[in-house]
Image (spheres, rainbow, N blue to C red):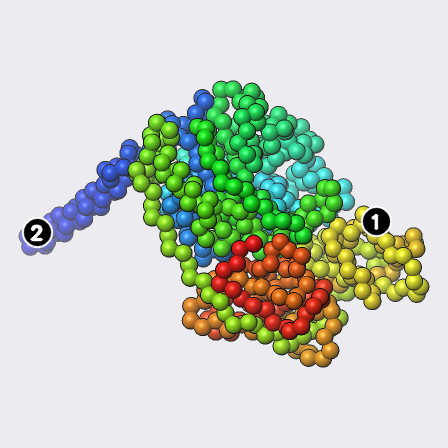
Amino acid sequence: MVVLRIRNVHKRKYALICLCIAGFIMYRYLGMPGRGRRMSRKVGLCANTSQFTLEGEPFRIIGGSIHYFRVPRAYWRDRLMKMKACGINTLTTYVPWNLHQPERGVFNFQTQLDLEAYISLAAEMELWVILRPGPYISSELDLGGLPSWLLQDSSMRLRTTYPGFIQAVNTFFDKLIPKLVPLQFKKGGPIIAVQVENEYGSFGKDQSYMLFIKEALQSRGISELLLTSDKHNTLKSGGVDGALRTVKLQKLNQRNIQELTAIQPNNPTMVMDYWTGWYDIWGELHHVLPPEVLRRGMSVNLYMFHGGSSFGFMSGALADPSYRALVPSYDYDAPLSESGEYTSKYHLLRDLLSRYKNSKKNMRYVAHSGGSDSLPDMPVLHYREAYEPAIMYQHLSLWDALSFTEGPFKSAKPVNMENLPVNNRNGQSYGYTLYETIITRGGLLQSGDNVRDRALPISICVFAGLVGDILLNNIPLRDFTIYSLDMKPSFIDRFVDFIKSNTLFPGFFMGRLFAYGYPSDTFVKLPGWEKGVVFINGFNLGRYWSIGPQQTLYLPGPFLNSGINQVYVIVVVPHRLQCVLFSLFPYFRI
């Protein structure tokens, strides 16, 4: 009898606990002020009328782009909190194929590239997500985000239904899409729409290609709204049946909007990329776009809301009308600066969206929380610090560094870096390539159109991005010894014994940076240096070049150790180097 009584007491306790949990859930999701009704998650985002609806409720997308691969993972939460505090309700991001699959059969969805964690964090921040998985994404990335090993096929036709390209896309999507399916709106996740390819209207060489990409997404379980995105003059050729067309604009222009509505008059109008600024090119001016406000009731995505940094060698280049390389900063003159600082655009945008949010007749918000009448508080900015200059006290010439490379390789003709037998025969994606041959006479050295990056002739020839013959007095050079310098951390880590003899260029400098206490954000400035690359603790911050416009490299605090930090500077072109040090500043915007 006593035993039964005790069990009944326990049952009552368990029932009370369960009741409390159930009550909390109902309060949290059904009864909390401002949260509105709970969504059934059966319909999702619809574009069947002139206005978007989400689960049957009017919905206006106020989106912003933040790329997870351009922001240190330690700062993902900070940047998304600042986005939420500005009044943005939807996060958009590209997915870079080349970073997720650096080699055939090798996939990386960990740490900095943990896309699932990024999307889950957006859900935690009560942000919806529009995903842009490509496979081509542009985004000012090298080869538009396509992996360089695709180019090993001499017959390759990128962004077409060429079998070699289709097979590679299928392999990538087989790994990527299953990670995204559970994160869709109808399955309880934040993904409300998925973009099919990117700006295909500007390329448009294969009529069946867009249909293939659409079906590749749907056959693997993508069931949310599909959309395409093109410039206003290529809207027709870039679309695909069954996907909503959206437009990219730098300024809101009524004529461009009318071109979109003329193609799909009974669907919502959306500016998928409303460019808040522009990317920068070495040797040109920094782009600044004055703040503009939204005057029309359409949905819009701000590209970029926060640009971040194209760390390492990932930044691409423009080829037309001539080769022009892009800087590593992806500041984009966005509302949040490269280092996550608030700008005048941020404050203007927050004020605008706050007023719209409070005026229900102008904009209906449908957020995870149902939307309250006030925006969240703006997060406190991270502390920044100016560290003592780093003294570069050891040096290794390029010629001495060649012993640490994989190779060398002999070839009668120059071999382009993508076809070098390195990285498990996947070729070389980034870094430098040295081509060495013996010249027995003087004359005129010519490359024609065969140098697709930067070339530096020295006592022997060093080239990067070489795709054909180099001519001396119109005669092709032959019998090359080729060295791959991909500048991966594993390559840099091999520099154990540095010499201190005469300084030769190109070369590698090594030094130390001391950071006391908890490391803070800072900026690297290299006064007196001309051109090269900076590594901190084996991480490639990016290129520097004195011609600007970028004069500093953003160094996030999470990349530093408390205490000693290893610094490597690769000097490709020396200039007025008087003292081998570089400075670190607490704040420096382009």
State the residue lying farthest toward the left: 1
All told, the count of numbered labels is 2
Label placed on residue 477? none
Among the two numbered marks 2 and 1 on one chain, the one whose residue lies closer to the N terminus: 2
The residue at the point 68 percent across, 63 percent down is 530
Kind of residue at disc 2 = Arg
Q: Secondary structure at mark 2?
A: helix
Residue 426's x, y, as percent?
69, 54
The residue at the point 32 percent across, 34 percent down is 358
576 versus 130 height, above or below: below
Residue 128's x, y, as percent?
42, 39
Judging by the rendered image, the residue that carries numbered circle 2 is 5
Q: Nearer the viewer, residue 513 or 296?
A: 296
Q: Nearer the viewer, residue 491 or 535?
A: 535
Residue 404's x, y, as percent?
70, 70
The residue at the point 72 percent across, 64 percent down is 573
Spatial CA span between label 2 and label 1: 94 Å
Q: Nearer the viewer, residue 331 or 45?
A: 331
Density class for disc 2 (Cα within 10 Å; few <14, some 14-19, many ≥20) is few
Q: Nearer the viewer, residue 199 or 277?
A: 277
Label placed on residue 448? 1
Residue 171 visible in the snapshot: no
User: Which of the 4 quarters of the picture holds residue 422?
Assistant: bottom right
Residue 180's x, y, as percent?
48, 42
User: Which of the 4 quarters of the picture holds residue 247?
Assistant: top right
Q: Quadrant of the C terminus?
A: bottom right
Kind of residue at disc 1 = Gly
